[in-house]
Amino acid sequence: MDAPYQAAPDVHVLPVHLPIPGAGVLPINAYVLGAAEPVLIDTGLGIDGDAFLDAVDSIVGLRNLRWLWLTHDDADHTGNIARIMEAAPQVRLVTHAFAAMRMSSWWPVPFDRVTAIRVGDRLPVGDRTLRAVAPPLYDNPMSTGLLDEATGNLFSVDSFGAILPEPTEDAAEVPHDALAGGMVAWATADSPWSNLVDRPRFSEVLDGVRRLQPTRIFSSHLPAASGTSLERFLEVLETVPDADPLPAPSHEEFTQMLAALAPVA
């Protein structure tokens, strides 16, 4: 796990950068939202365990945490969910109903502490309300993002993610061509169904995101970005249905990736 950083007055990023041999790095972010009733958004990688809990505790205090918004139940988002729920028994888990039910196959989800959320629902968290929104691209049908209606901050789940040349804390620091190429590469790998979509309908989906007019964009797989980047990001996503999906690595390529990762481990 990398050092947490503050990307907005009330948003702390808990980042990891996963090396992708031959391509760059993939950011994997969880977030702490400093609302009156503090919110943890996703729970990082399980291998970070103690470091992740220590980071949350140092930012907001586990005893003060009130909500855990799980955007979806993939491994890079659920890594420390059971430990958080145990360490902070006052926390309620906010997630898609099917995600909560599916997770119960591998850990004893405390259903009495679950608030099922769906797109359009609003969650009051003391000094603000969080609105559940649908990300335009996703790898999991349970994916549920959120818009902080007080600040305009948009948490876009996997959408707008990108494979980057190197770690950074600000998407504006990534050269335009590198960011666009990394965003398309990630989108075609993470949402391989995107080349099957009806183009006009997909444009309507992107227009729906445009109407949110976020002030800041917090993707699970991109450094923090200003809302002024939204139009540029949407223009990149508009091209994704016409891009060739990335093929899965062959066994030989997989072996080469492991060899390249060995010095990093």
Image (cartoon, helix red, strand yellow):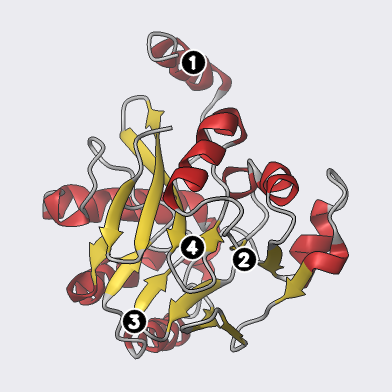
Quadrant assignment for the C terminus: top left
How far apart marks 2 and 3 lie (CA) works out to 19 Å
Query: Relative to 181, is 54 above or below?
Result: above
Q: Residue at x 85, y 58 (%)?
A: 110
Decide which of tag 4 and tag 2 comes sooner along the chain: 2
How far apart marks 1 and 3 lie (CA) works out to 41 Å
Mark number, residue 258: 1
Number of other residues with Cα within 10 Å of mark 2, as a class: few under 14, some 14 to 19, many 20 or more: many
Circle 1 SS class: helix
Write down the residue under mark 2: 67
Type of amino acid under label 2: Trp
Write down the residue under mark 3: 152
Decide which of tag 1 and tag 2 comes sooner along the chain: 2
Query: In the image, 149: left or right of 39?
Result: left
Q: Residue at x 84, y 45 (%)?
A: 107
Question: Residue 1 sits in which quadrant?
Answer: top left
Write down the residue under mark 4: 157
